[in-house]
Image (spheres, rainbow, N blue to C red):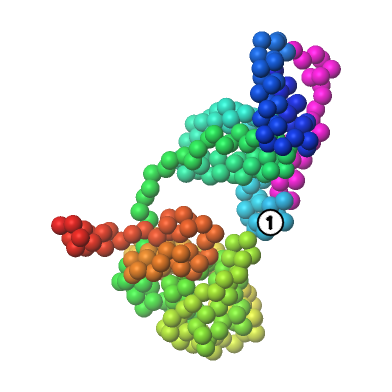
Amino acid sequence: MKDLLISDITREMLPYLNNAQMLKLQEVLNHCLWNVNVEMNQEQSEDTPEKTNDEFLELFITAKRVEGCSEKTLKYYQATIRKMFSITSIHVTHITTEDLRSYLADYQKINNCSKANIDNIRRILSTFFAWLEDENYIIKSPVRRIHKIRTAKTVKETYTDESLELLRDNAENLRDLAMIDLLASTGMRVGEMVQLNIEDIDFENRECIVFGKGSKERPVYFDARTKIHLKNYIQSRTDDNAALFVSLLKPYNRLEISGVEIRLRELGKKLGIHKVHPHKFRRTLATRAIDKGMPIEQVQHLLGHAKIDTTMQYAMVNQNNVKISHQKFIA
């Protein structure tokens, strides 16, 4: 109860004191009240903070929407934070580090989920409470002392040269062949690809502008083979849809992400290639680019990553190259 009282006092003084003064105030309150018993009377216990948890959440979502977060990301934020509210039943201004540690531990135990999943929840809660701190709704984020959860690093698969050629040779139509080549040569996200229109393609310079996460524009580049297959596909079409990739049957609607995933998965099963999906092309491009000496900063821009750490997660170093380097420099 004493800690809550000190927290309430310091929070009320946030608009009037700087950081150094706030620290001094907390020090004085802790010193003066260290041997004082604090009890809350019935009238005080019925008092509620000015904003509810749901109101704080709505303010947070609005702020993130203004910052350019996608609706998919916002829904993930909202569902994760609301789940935490339903379990803890504590007002955000009173939630402690211990409350959140207990919540994460119980969540993992009850749902039997991976450490990576728990760390994703931790990151979202960290973003939320950091925003509350920045907006002066709380003194300090309780997630600060909850460090990144260590997860096992697995080397994710990439396509071999043989697999890529098999996919190309066995594509059932010009559209699927053009899709495979565009994903393999640009490393773009499948969500970026399905948004493209024919007019977005600059065939002369072999490039196009895509809209990545957060509606950020960036140029991507494709090779000569992709240029030829894209042109052949576009010239074969009889529809008037502006989309770069459309369904094979009338009314020739714009192809969706699920449509691309299904086509590639079916082709992979037919050829006996393990885990064929659009994102694997992106990982393959990043790995090969780094293996061939492309600076990691350039790979970062090519893939449209805000942080270079994300790029490093995509770019799995080829173990054969490690062996060759060992023989060259050490053995």
Does 89 appear above or below 136?
above
Type of amino acid under label 1: Glu
Looking at this view, name the residue that lies furthest to the right: 43
x 69%, y 21%: residue: 28
Looking at this view, name the residue that lies furthest to the left: 331
Q: Nearer the viewer, residue 300 or 123?
A: 300
Residue 118, how many percent across, how many down? 51, 40
Q: Write down the residue under mark 1.
A: 67
Crowding at dot 1, Cα within 10 Å, few <14 / some 14-19 / many 20+, comes out as: few
x 34%, y 75%: residue: 165
Residue 262, how many percent across, how many down? 49, 65
x 58%, y 78%: residue: 244
SS of the residue under disc 1: loop
* Magenta stretch bounds: 39-62
Does 47 appear above or below 158?
above
Q: Is 144 on the left-hand or right-hand side of 41?
A: left
Residue 54, how many percent across, how many down? 74, 39
Q: Quadrant of residue 256?
A: bottom right
Q: Quadrant of the C terminus?
A: bottom left
x 66%, y 10%: residue: 35
113 part of magenta stretch:
no
Q: Quadrant of the N terminus?
A: top right
Q: Nearer the viewer, residue 298 or 162?
A: 298
Does 259 appear above or below 141?
below
